[in-house]
Image (cartoon, rainbow, N blue to C red):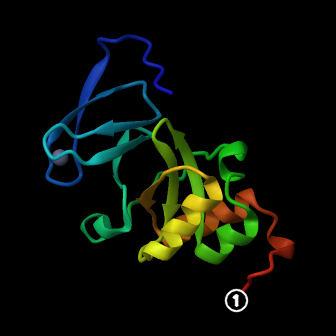
């Protein structure tokens, strides 16, 4: 959750959609925020704002985002999606929000897959579009790659 050491410690960053000025807590590392200008749900990761899609229909606007390699996904969060499904769909659970599970995926992702992910994590799904190399690196670091069943 948000762990601002000082409520007044707020800085402004640019909304990636239209360059709107968005206030974020400087000490916030992994939290959700909403651009008050355009309503875009944003993920604040390592002091960068990355747009989050609440449904697959919005993915075209956002495109793949560069998530900092320094960002570390917790084991318990990644474990929300079983290895077989993670490799099959090329996704990884990245963070837990009060309103759902944030899943990093590579577009395109069809609605059937989103429904499947929602079923797997048993919670609303929020999507952050990631570079496929980033997803591949995360999968390799969170799952044992020696025995995965869905290799190419
Ligand atoms: Zn905006």
Q: Residues within 10 Å of mark 1 (few under 14, many from 20)?
A: few
- The residue closer to the viewer here, 94 or 134, is 94
The residue at 28%/71% (across/down) is: 60
Quarter of the image with the C terminus in it:
bottom right
Determine which quarter of the picture holds residue 32.
top left
User: Which residue is situated farthest in the bottom direction here?
Assistant: 152
The residue at 73%/57% (across/down) is: 142
User: Which residue is situated farthest in the right direction here?
Assistant: 147
Q: Which residue position holds label 1?
A: 152
Determine which quarter of the picture holds residue 5.
top left
Label 1: element kind: loop
Q: Where is residue 105? Give x, y as percent.
A: 50, 66
Q: Where is residue 96? Give x, y as percent.
A: 55, 41
Q: Where is residue 113? Give x, y as percent.
A: 52, 73
Count numbered badges in the picture. Answer: 1
Above or below: residue 103 compared with residue 100: below
Above or below: residue 54 compared with residue 87: above
Horizontally, residue 108 falls left or right of residue 115, namely left
Determine which quarter of the picture holds residue 34.
top left
The residue at 54%/64% (across/down) is: 134
Above or below: residue 122 compared with residue 140: above
- Residue 4 in sight in this render: yes
Horizontally, residue 101 falls left or right of residue 33, namely right
The residue at 54%/70% (across/down) is: 133
Horizontally, residue 42 falls left or right of residue 90, namely left
- Residue 109 in sight in this render: no
């Amino acid at each position: 959750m948000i762990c601002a050491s000082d409520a007044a410690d707020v800085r402004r960053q640019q909304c990636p959609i239209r360059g709107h000025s968005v206030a974020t807590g400087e000490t916030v590392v992994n939290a959700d925020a909403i651009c008050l200008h355009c309503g875009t749900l944003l993920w604040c990761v390592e002091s960068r704002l990355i747009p989050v899609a609440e449904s697959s229909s919005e993915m075209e606007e956002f495109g793949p985002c560069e998530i900092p390699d320094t960002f570390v996904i917790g084991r318990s969060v990644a474990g929300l999606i079983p290895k077989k499904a993670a490799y099959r769909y090329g996704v990884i659970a990245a963070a837990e929000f009060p309103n759902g599970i944030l899943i990093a995926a590579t577009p395109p992702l069809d609605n059937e897959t989103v429904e499947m992910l929602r079923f797997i994590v048993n919670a609303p799904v929020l999507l952050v579009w990631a570079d496929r190399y980033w997803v591949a690196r995360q999968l390799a670091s969170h799952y044992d790659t020696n025995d995965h069943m869905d290799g190419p």
